[in-house]
Image (cartoon, grey):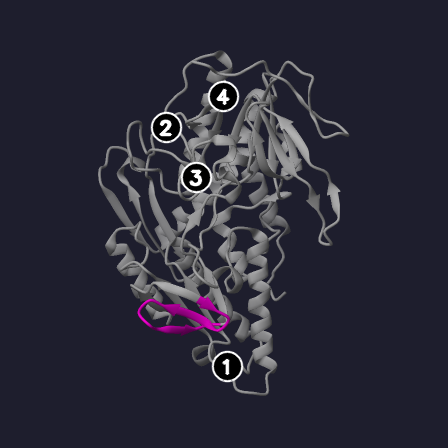
Amino acid sequence: MLYYNAPFELRETENNMAEKTSSLHQIVIVGGGAGGIELATKLGNKLGKRKKAEITLIDCTLTHIWKPLLHEIAAGTLDSHADDLEYLAQANWHHFKFRYGRMDSLDRGKQEVSLAPTVDENGVEYIPRRNFHYDTLIIAVGSTTNDFGIKGVKEHCYSLDTREQAERFHSLLLKKCYSAQTSTKPLREGQLHVAIAGAGATGVELAAELHESTRELVAYGLDNIDPDRDLKISLIEAADRILPALPERLSNATVEALQKINVDVRTGERIIEATPDGFKTESGHFIPSEIKVWAAGIKAPDFLQDIDGLETNRINQLVVKSTLQTTRDENIFAFGDCAACPVKPGSEELVPPRAQAAHQQASMLVKSMKRRLQGHALPEYKYVDYGSLVNLSSYTTVGNLMGNLLGRWTGSVMLEGVIARFIYKSLYRMHRIALYGVVGTLLQDIANLLIRKPRRRLKFH
């Protein structure tokens, strides 16, 4: 089997060429999401520190935040800078390099990735186009919202793919509430109505979080707003039930919990158009809303579509084998949401876009890179479903844990309430442990307890 060509080191030069100067094998990781940053950290500790390979992480942002937290940033219940991680610092601590930029093209013949020029808020270029040589390229750029070409979605809806998008949504929410507070006229229909398209985990968690945060905001002094009359939240799903990835019993339990807090849950409603004033559905209904979120589907970033001849599917995912190598180039790997990977060798079923899958694949790729450098055959990935948990703000948490997480048990265990919430929070702790280690995570928790000052839970700006 062919593994890699002669390895080289990358050095950025004034003419932006990828200069080849070192004997170390170059592993370039594009994308610093949950999987990418975990992989870069582990490879840096195992290979970079020992000078067995040079690890470079490329991302179009300067900081990392765990994507499942974005709905809390959008609702204002999490400070967007309280839980972020600076890539440059992490690289320094864990023996890899970080390069800031957005990949937009690939030259497989030269084994180079190209980063688009970086411009400031005024459109002035301050980082030129650069090229990076690789011996092994690992693409982990995640996913973006899929609007399915539905009219008006791009123009009138907010997505929650990045921290910046979540912050913009929170800013809009505050503007709408402050405007309503100071208005001398009756509120427009839909003025404080939030409509969320898509009732997967993101949509459901956002609905519950917004219900709590908006009522807390009103309680702090926006006394011209009646939360029961003026603040409305609708959750719209084309399928016949919400949370289709979970067992029906948990889906039903979640509907009951949402209905108790007066979230309007609409299933079997397919949206055909988004307007400034709301959503139009296929059944002829109009759902008034001036605050709209689109969380109805995902796709891999558009730049991956047929990139330099690599095989992609209809949602731009790179098609990979069970080794996570792309089907047309054994030097290029892909994992996480941007990869179409079989759940096990020979299966036509694909790995679902979940954080647990990216974590499992990152762990396997650490072993794969060590074996690749030694010229050994690569392991094959088999997806292990540990279940799913959905957090409904402070109201409740529901989910199921699969038997393979519980030793010899089979089937799945349904969880609700305090135990489910504890396990849900533990998932984020596991991610932090992967980045900081057990001792580092523990020291961070202790430090936070010692320096924490009494503060409100909600952000007002």
The alpha-carbon separation of the residues under discs 4 and 1 comes to 58 Å
Q: Residues within 10 Å of mark 3 (few under 14, many from 20)?
A: many
Residue found at x 50% / y 40%: 34
Mark 3 or mark 1, which is nearer to you? 3
Of the pair 218 and 238, the residue shown nearer to us: 238
Q: Which residues are magenta?
A: 274-289
Q: Is residue 390 magenta?
A: no
Element class at badge 2: loop
N-terminal of the pair, mark 4 or mark 2, is 4
Residue 32 at what x, y percent from top left?
56, 38
Q: Amino acid at mark 1?
A: Arg
The alpha-carbon separation of the residues under discs 2 and 1 comes to 53 Å
The alpha-carbon separation of the residues under discs 2 and 3 comes to 17 Å
Q: Pointer 4: what residue?
A: 369
In the rendered view, would you say 295 is above or below 223?
above
In the rendered view, would you say 227 is above or below 281?
below
Mark 4 touching mark 2, by CB under 8 A? no
In the rendered view, would you say 435 is above or below 241?
above
Which quarter shows the C terminus?
Answer: bottom right
Q: Pointer 2: what residue?
A: 381
Element class at badge 3: loop
In the rendered view, would you say 13 is above or below 284?
above
N-terminal of the pair, mark 2 or mark 1, is 1
Mark 3 or mark 4, which is nearer to you? 3
N-terminal of the pair, mark 2 or mark 3, is 3
Q: Amino acid at mark 2?
A: Tyr
Q: Quadrant of residue 335?
A: top left
Q: Which mark is residue 188?
A: 1
Q: Pointer 3: what residue?
A: 317
Q: Amino acid at mark 4?
A: Met
